[in-house]
Amino acid sequence: MYLSKFKAGLIWILLYSCFIYQSNAQQQYQLDSPDKDLKINIEISDSIYYSVYAQGELLLGNNTLSLQLKNEVLGVKPKIKKVKNTSGTEERSPIVPLKFSNIKKDFKAIEIEFKGNYSIEFKAYNEGIAYRFKLGKKGSLEVIQENFDIVFPAEYTLHLQQTPSFKTSYEYPYTHLKSSDFTAEESMSVLPVLIETTGNHKILISESDLLNYPAMFVKGTGNGLKSVFPKNPIDFEDEGDRSMKILKRADYVAKIDGNRTLPWRYFVISDKDTEILENTMSANLATPNVLKDVEWIKPGQVSWEWWNGASPYNVDFVAGFNEETYKYFIDFASEFGIPYIIMDEGWAASTTDPYTPNPDIDLFELIEYGKKRNVKIVLWLTWLTVEHHFDLFEKFAEWGIAGIKIDFMDRSDQWMVHFYERVAKEAAKHELFVDFHGSFKPAGLEYKYPNILSYEGVLGMEQMGRATPDNSLFLPFMRNAVGAMDYTPGAMISMQPEFYYSRRPNSAAIGTRAQQMAFFVIFESGLQMLADNPTNYFKNEECTQFITDVPVTWDQTIALEAEVGQYAIVAKRKGKQWYLGGIANSKEDERTFKIKLDFLPEGETLQLTSFEDGVNAKRQAMDYVKRTKTVKKDDVLEITIVKNGGWAAKIE
């Protein structure tokens, strides 16, 4: 009997040990990218931990995530209910394809469901990883804080757009500093953030599927980053014609439905800078298009009067924000096949009244004038005027307006993020597209509502001397790498920085003429501005013809050469035509590149027309040379780009 009890006890101990071993084993999970270059190790213990590896190198270690609600914290002492692994291929065809008309990506995913009716979903692609919370609770929830905490195993370099407050136009220059120098006491940073590791990997951090939830900001911890969010405003009043004074904020960052997903937090990871330029993570993770009819959505270029002060010259009328000037802009747009003109601030008698045009302008005559010339009108508005007059969408559609440019939001709390979606939805009902200025970065809404053609949220050319090539060379790797960017390129007066002077009506840009032309190939926007005035474009017809030939949507993108913040050379295809663009910063007097043309079709001899920095472009930035030559698939093209310079070409 004693022996049988001993045996029974031994069996119980063995079973218990097996249970403990199995229980402990179930707390560790691994998710690899399809090509196995990236790996996420997930550990569930007192919290949810994950570490990120690339090619065996630890990039981010012992990171944690949690969600603090009003009455509980999800992710602390979590209890697993079940785990589900999936893999497959996702295929998307964006309505407004900025890089690829067809995106086909393999993925692997793991969803860990916990007691308490929530789960965490991790997803791995070859180009990066992502995670999000999925909630299955009843009623509404108050989110006090979402904790995104990542840890660097070594000293890293951070590229940031820092801001002193949550109210920001996203137009600060990038700063570049060691991770140990970015502490919680310093200014926080908006997304995206770009990280350079000690092992030459780059990590681009941003978010997608941001819906009715505040945008994430980050602060430094000395050895990592942590999330911060603006609290939701609950009491406010008008402050002037384009802002609201927030009188009271809630103690939560978001009030949400308990049964929903939260935004994806994603990391583009690569040791090749070219792959950052080609990434499609925002599109991969966004809610797909919900609009039934999209045939009316027509991306394209737009002539814009504000940057140049509505000041054409060598004309027989007094230039300004008046009817004759706008007809001149329409005539210019029509001659070069530009589908839109923008009437910016000044088209209306008052910025607060969207229904009464400036008395010097017969808006309805201009609409008809443009219609006969295949040019449609886009109207500028402050967001506050839109909020107070949501019936304007219906009215503008009746007038024949194509779209609206909405400005000065300068916030990304939950209320304002939801404003973007309300606008997109209402505009789509009346077949109007939207260009958001004074905005936060794209975060997936433009895929759900593809009538959102662009966002500003960038230190662009309208900032004149602040828009330096040294800063702009980070844009393809950061701001433009996460979505459409309204930089407003197209200056015909170009200067090197040591000679720079600009004032309307003679607005100028820093950098060479060839760089301005290359921007149209490299910078991505569903509504691409031509910022200069028509007289200057008419005087530079061969440059204007090239610029206006460049599409704004693409079937294929190939990054040929790239180094973060230094240079970028890209080839893009629309149908059978290829366009190439190259830009460089000020760090070298000139750079020479050898570009393989192996992306061209086999057996065809094609014509390449290029616009290159001229022999004097290092001093006189408007100096350029136009060349033509025949090329084939097995050719190697040698190109030279000077400081703050560029190179642009078309192959047909």
Image (cartoon, rainbow, N blue to C red):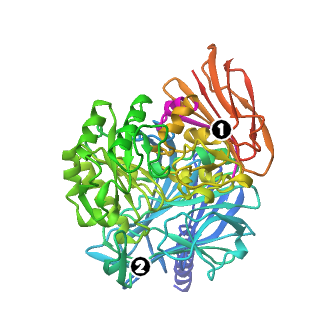
611 and 308: which is toward the camera: 308
Picture layout, residue 439 above or below residue 634: below
Q: Secondary structure at mark 1?
A: helix
555 magenta-colored: yes
Q: Position of residue 32 (x, y in %)?
A: 59, 53
155 and 403: which is toward the camera: 403
Locate residue 537 relative to residue 400 in the image: left or right. Answer: right
Q: Position of residue 615 (x, y in %)?
A: 78, 34
Picture layout, residue 392 above or below residue 7: above
Mark 2 or mark 1: name the one nearer the start of the chain: 2
Q: Quadrant of residue 237?
A: bottom left
Q: Is residue 21 visible?
A: no
Locate residue 370 relative to residue 447 in the image: left or right. Answer: left
Q: Quadrant of residue 349?
A: bottom left
Name the residue located 54 percent from the left edge and 82 percent from the top edge: 9
Q: Position of residue 35 (x, y in %)?
A: 61, 45
- The C terminus sits in image quarter: top right
Picture layout, residue 617 above or below residue 225: above
Q: Amino acid at mark 2?
A: Lys
Q: Which residue is mark 2?
A: 231
Q: Is residue 155 visible?
A: yes
Q: Secondary structure at mark 2?
A: loop
Q: Position of residue 430 (x, y in %)?
A: 22, 48
Q: Nearer the viewer, mark 2 or mark 1?
A: 1
Q: Amino acid at mark 1?
A: Ala
Name the residue located 25 percent from the left edge and 43 percent from the top edge: 292
64 and 603: which is toward the camera: 603
Q: CA distance from mark 2 to mark 1?
A: 45 Å
Magenta stretch: give its range: 543-565
Name the residue located 41 percent from the left edge and 58 percent from the top edge: 209
Q: Which residue is mark 1?
A: 514
236 and 8: which is toward the camera: 236
